[in-house]
Image (tube, rainbow, N blue to C red):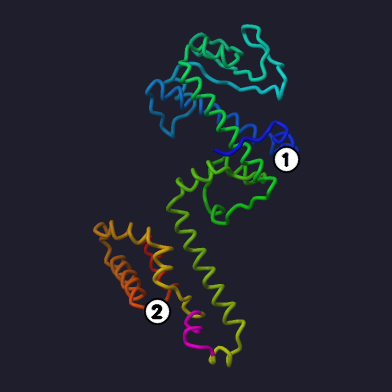
Amino acid sequence: MPTPLTEKEVNRLYQLLNKEQRELLEQYLKQSKKSKWIEKLAHKKGVILRSDMSMNEIWDILNDWELKEVLNGGYSQRPYRCECGMPLRFCYIVHHRKENKTYRLGVTCLGNYTMLYPELIKDITNGFHKVDLERDEILKRYENGWDLTEDYIELALSEQIQKQIDVGLPLSDNQIHKTEHQFKDELRRIRYKYELERMAQYRKESIKSLSHSEYQGVSPTRRSSINEYLITYDQILFKHLGQLKQTRENEHKIVNSSIKTQWSTVQNSVKSLKHGEEINYSDFLSRMLARCII
């Protein structure tokens, strides 16, 4: 687990952000903690939450203590008061839906008032700690400089992630992991497309750098590398073994004769490489991409 930033470090990094970035990050952290709260309550009640459910629908089902906000008074500061009168640095503002009452509580009274098991309270606070680590990750990436990968530009990203990108805030590993999972197929196709474009640019620049006489005088191997983007059997396995295995496992589902032909050609290309022959790598990728054999 990464080492959390100190309070001083967090404050210093926050000063690097503009007002819009700070507000967006705080909004994301607040919502993430609410989501952790809901997740743990739902697990406790044995409720399965669907991704298409609204917050009102979720709370109609849970009908329990709702987390409104977690306030942090700052290092060595206790500006808030618990319902029991104890001064607090961390104040949990919770709303009891049945009673329609809101309470400001410390972590001890949080358990006493809500009657949630100590283990569940610990799970919830541990979840909050993970959210804070995600905040640290975003702040450190911002300081070190972070560029969005070009393949995300073509995706219909969630509102939160798109807003972060628009204001120049980095994404956390958690956000990247969710995006990669959500757009797995789209990203696979986009990345193959970009690889084809890079290969085309490579060939263009390679040919442009040689005069006609120089091009005619290069070795067949070098010329093949320029025109065909030469690749070895080991490189094919390194780059595409997972996709090839996946297609082979599902080849019985291929009913389109054209796609069957493309898949047969792809397999023959791999066999040719294994026997020491050369193949047109650009053509190989085009067949996999155009026919979705990936």
Magenta span: helix, strand or loop, mainly?
helix
Residue at 32 percent of width and 59 percent of height: 247
Q: Residues within 10 Å of mark 2 (few under 14, many from 20)?
A: many
Residue at 52 percent of width and 13 percent of height: 111
Identify the element where label 2 is drawn: loop
Residue at 58 percent of width and 90 percent of height: 214
In the drawing, does residue 238 fall left or right of residue 201?
A: left
Residue at 55 percent of width and 33 percent of height: 130
Residue 188 belongs to magenta span: no
User: The residue under label 2 is which amino acid type?
Assistant: Glu
Q: Choose between 31 and 216: the one closer to the eye.
A: 216
> Above or below — where is 65 with respect to 25?
above
In the drawing, does residue 2 fall left or right of residue 278?
A: right
Q: Choose between 23 and 270: the one closer to the eye.
A: 270
State which tag comes first along the sequence, 1 or 2. 1
Query: To which residue does mark 2 refer?
Result: 278
Q: Position of residue 22 (x, y in %)?
A: 69, 36
Q: Position of residue 30 (x, y in %)?
A: 60, 29
- Range of magenta residues: 218-225
Identify the element where label 1 is drawn: loop
User: The residue under label 1 is which amino acid type?
Assistant: Leu
> Above or below — where is 128 with respect to 189?
above
Q: Quadrant of residue 163?
A: top right
Query: To which residue does mark 1 refer?
Result: 17
The quarter of the image holding the C terminus is bottom left
Mark 1 or mark 2, which is nearer to you? Answer: 2
Q: Choose between 148 and 225: the one closer to the eye.
A: 225
Q: Residues within 10 Å of mark 1 (few under 14, many from 20)?
A: some
